[in-house]
Amino acid sequence: MSRLHILQTSDSLQRALPCIAPGDTLIFFPEALAASASDTPRHDVIQYRLDDGSGKSSTLPSIDYSRFVSLCSEHSHCLSW
């Protein structure tokens, strides 16, 4: 069963890495995305970035708050980092 990892802070990705498995979904909040070494998508997980309205470009698909809430309800396990 896949999990949803909500990455909110600058050290979120480093803390979450040991728990991320193939098929999991990652959502990067702006601070977490800015602090990540690279926003190049991994091929074994689904990745999104929460749109903060800044217009910054990224290789990750952008989602709005409504889609974020939908993803939370679609996953039985949501982990916030």
Image (cartoon, rainbow, N blue to C red):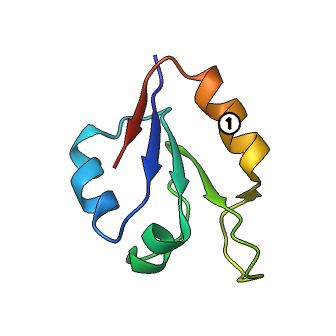
Q: Nearer the viewer, residue 22 or 55?
A: 55
Question: Residue at 38% across / 36% down in the picture?
Answer: 79
Q: What secondary structure is marked by label 1?
A: helix
Q: Answer left or right for 50 relative to 8.
A: right
Q: Position of residue 48 (x, y in %)?
A: 63, 54
The picture quadrant where one finds residue 71 is: top right
- 50 versus 78 height, above or below: below
Q: Is residue 20 visible?
A: yes
Q: Position of residue 2 (x, y in %)?
A: 48, 24
Q: Position of residue 25 (x, y in %)?
A: 53, 39
Using a 10 Å C-alpha cutoff, classify the residue at mark 1 as few (fewer than 14 neighbours), some (14 to 19) or many (20 or more): few
Question: Residue at 73% across / 49% down in the picture?
Answer: 65
Q: Answer left or right for 73 relative to 39.
A: right
The picture quadrant where one finds residue 77 is: top left
Residue identifier under label 1:
69
The picture quadrant where one finds residue 54 is: bottom right
- 48 versus 75 height, above or below: below
Question: Residue at 65% across / 59% down in the picture?
Answer: 50
- 64 versus 23 height, above or below: below
Q: Is residue 43 visible?
A: no
Tell me the kind of residue under disc 1.
Answer: Val
Q: Answer left or right for 33 relative to 81.
A: right
- 61 versus 57 height, above or below: above
Q: Position of residue 21 (x, y in %)?
A: 36, 35
Please state the total of marks drawn on the protein image. Answer: 1
Question: Residue at 37% across / 65% down in the picture?
Answer: 9
